Amino acid sequence: MLLNDILDWVEELSYWQKVIAKKILKNEIFTYEDVEKVFEIVMVENKLSDKNIIEEELKFKNIQEVNEGIKNNSIKWKGLENVVGVNAIHENAKLGIGPQLTMIYGENGSGKTGYTRLLNNIFVSKGDKKILQNIFEDKYSEPSAVTLFEYENEEIESINYPDVKKHPFYKKVAVFDSHSATEGLTNESELSFTPFEFDFFDKFLEAIELVKKRFDEEVKKHQLNDSFKKQFMKETSVKKLIENIDSYSNLEHFKESILITDNDKERREKNYRKLLNLKAQDPFEQIKTYKDLIKQFREIKKYLSNINGMFNKTTFACLENLVNNTESLRRLSSEEGVERFKDYNIENIGSQEWENFLEAAFNYYNTIEHEVENCLLCRQNIQHTNILNEYWEYLKSGYKSLVNLEEQKIKEKIDLYSNINGVLIREDTVLYNWISKNDLNFLEYIKEFSESLIDLKEKIIESLKKGTWNVYEGNELNFDCKLIDNQIEKLYNYIDSLNEFDIKKEIRALEKEEDEFSDKSLANNLFSEIEEYHLTQNWLEKSKKVKINTTKITRKQNELFSKYVTQKYIDIFEEECTKLNANFSTEISQRGKKGTTFKKLLIKGEKPVNILSEGEQRAISLANFLAESSLSEDNICIILDDPVSSLDNKRKETIANRLINECFTRQVVIFTHDLLFLKIMVDKANLNNINCEQVTLRRIKNKTGISTDDHGWISLSVKKRISKLKDDYQKLQTTYKNLSDDRPEDLINYENQIKLWFEKIRETWEKSVEDVLFNGAVRRFDYAIQTQRLDKAAVNQEYVLEIITGMTESSKWVHDKAEIIGEEIPEPEVLKEQLDKLDAFYKKLMNNQKNKK
């Protein structure tokens, strides 16, 4: 037996795994407290905790299944109620299910898909689970429902979905739809139905994962904190010891290595004082200062080389030429202006002030973006005056343009000489102090040059501005840069004179000893952190040896799966293919993966969907579903959505026979819009004395998914339907009489009932076309047209008109047109009038048929 094999295997597990297994085998919930308990056992077993745990003796041979109710197949699924938030199903809808066969008929848009998707989410299914929101509701409601199960003693258990998403009873029901059919034919899929005992492995694996998660959380808490290492920044022997600490290190040896004796302290005091003395006469700072002075001298030399080039004879000649040329151009420009404007009697014409005035006016004029008719100063009309244009042309003339170019050059030269800093070395600098202590003559030379530089700079700027060159030969400046080279050479000699190597070597040796002493002191201060780091390393090293994985469990699960499930599935599948006339040499490719088997259907190496017809595909997929669901003895009900969609009549008959046989072993629920298949199933159920519940899903106004237990309404004859309508009319009449203003909900209920009643009136008019008008010669759900019945058919314009009128009148109330045209909800007299018309029509046609005998 499967359970005995599981128990034998559990006996070989470690103690902490046995504790979990016992809890699951006794069908007890593995709680958070259980996780903590098992976690502590794992810690102690692996020497990661010092707690004392007493192992209790665990025996498994006498363990039996405790919750027999879960595996009790006398349970029946009774249906759904309080369905909320599902598209195409009205709020608080309910759906009743019979003890053997339940046929649920509904036309397109009546709510079948909404119910199927909801059931796909609740029960075992590979079908379409995408539930859309109910579009006819203003606010969003989470899809929910109450599932009802009945015990053998008729006690009802209600389970709220999705509050309870995993319940043992949910595994007792399996759902098949077009999506799951396609999935099985195109993709690799998991075997969804297994013997009840395999739930042990699922729960065991889940519990192991919880313990592993708890252990991983504990490992994260023991993450290494090595921040203390950053405090050891010098390259010392202590730092190397710190960096090499691991779980194998001897901490006692480390303590000995960082021990500081009294002799160490005395030696450190002596060395420290010696180090301070050496650093006080440290040549390093002097050398650094000398090198900085050399750098400054070189920068000054570079600056003075540029200055020499600006104050030599060649440069002065160029400047003089620029000044003279500019003045010459200015005279020519002035003469041109006097000549051009001599007839205008303008004061000081040709003067510099006059030109400046014109340029300023021109610049101001250019800032105005529209035509100017009045003078910008005196506001006189200048529209017919040409002098302004002549002014502007003058400013743009040849001489004036050349003057502007030369003046721009002079301006640039003025800026250049103005930026010259005459103070070569500031008195508050180290360089000035050094020169004043080492070479007073050189210092005096610098001061004299600076004074001459400042004077000559100002003289050049003045000449440029006035346009008269008054700097003559002999005024040139030239700083002797060799004097700076002498100072640099002198500084290098000072650097060479210092005994750098010996002092540096001794300082370094003393600093190294100081670093060693400092790191030893630091290590002693941080020893508690170092010790904690070492202990954590030891703990983590041990934790790496803890193996909490599911490989061994999965291996055993797969082994038992192959022994008890895989071959059984293959045998059942082949048997189902035979029963459904679907022997297409279908092969089954299988592989195991973590506690389950994945299988793929193939025909000659190809997917069935690529080879078989639609009908053959549906037969194969149905055989696959029936084989899978038969694997579990726990299954009590199968639900099928349109199992014969688009199939021919012959294959419908085959599938109907197979599903009728299923009704003897478990509940069968079928959603269909196929009237022929409905009739076949009802007839076969009656023939085999199988209880067949017939439910119709209707759409009234915007409400869909309305289930009505019509006692086989779809298959009733016109005569029986009229009889049923009369009974319902009597009930509606009583409801109407009891209406009260203080109970408006009764009026709403009455309105809904009459809409349904008129829907049945309309359907009966439709059926009268088949049964009465054509005398059953043409039926929507028959295999063929019965031509021999046409002799009693009675078709004329009068009858057709009556049918059209009856359909129109009944549809008015069904589709809510009464509200649009302002009519009130019909009273019982209106219902009786419509019923009488239908009854009279039926009797008239029946009499007509009798007269034809």
Image (cartoon, rainbow, N blue to C red):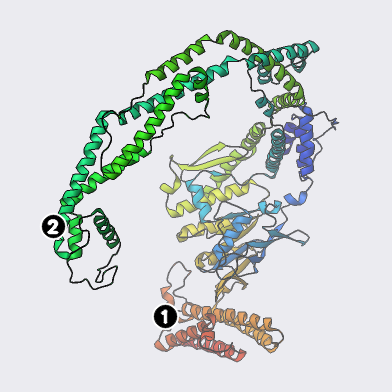
> How far from the left and from the top, in percent, is residue 281?
62, 15
Q: Which residue is mark 2?
A: 339
Q: Is residue 665 left or right of residue 407?
A: right
Q: Nearer the viewer, residue 88 or 528?
A: 528
Q: Are marks 1 and 2 in contact (CB under 8 Å)?
A: no
Please tell me which residue is depicted at 39% across the width and 34% down the height of the picture: 454
Residue 248 visible within the image = no
Q: Which of the 4 image quadrants contains residue 511?
A: top right
> How far from the left and from the top, in percent, is residue 618?
49, 53
Query: Number of labelled discs?
Result: 2
Of marks 1 and 2, the one in the foreground: 2
Q: Nearer the viewer, residue 330 or 297?
A: 330
Amino acid type at circle 2 is: Glu
**Cα separation between marks 1 and 2:** 131 Å
Please tell me which residue is depicted at 18% across the width and 51% down the height of the picture: 333
Q: Is residue 595 left or right of residue 586?
A: right
Q: Secondary structure at mark 1?
A: helix
> How far from the left and from the top, in percent, is residue 615?
45, 55
Q: Which of the 4 image quadrants contains residue 371?
A: bottom left
Q: If the image is split into quadrants, where does the N terminus sit?
A: top right
Circle nearer the N terminus (1, 2):
2
- Number of residues whose C-alpha sits closer than 10 Å to that of mark 1, classed few (under 14), some (14–19) or many (20 or more): few
Tell me the number on the disc at residue 829: none
Q: Is residue 108 above or below residue 445?
A: below
Q: Which residue is mark 1?
A: 791
Amino acid type at circle 1 is: Asp
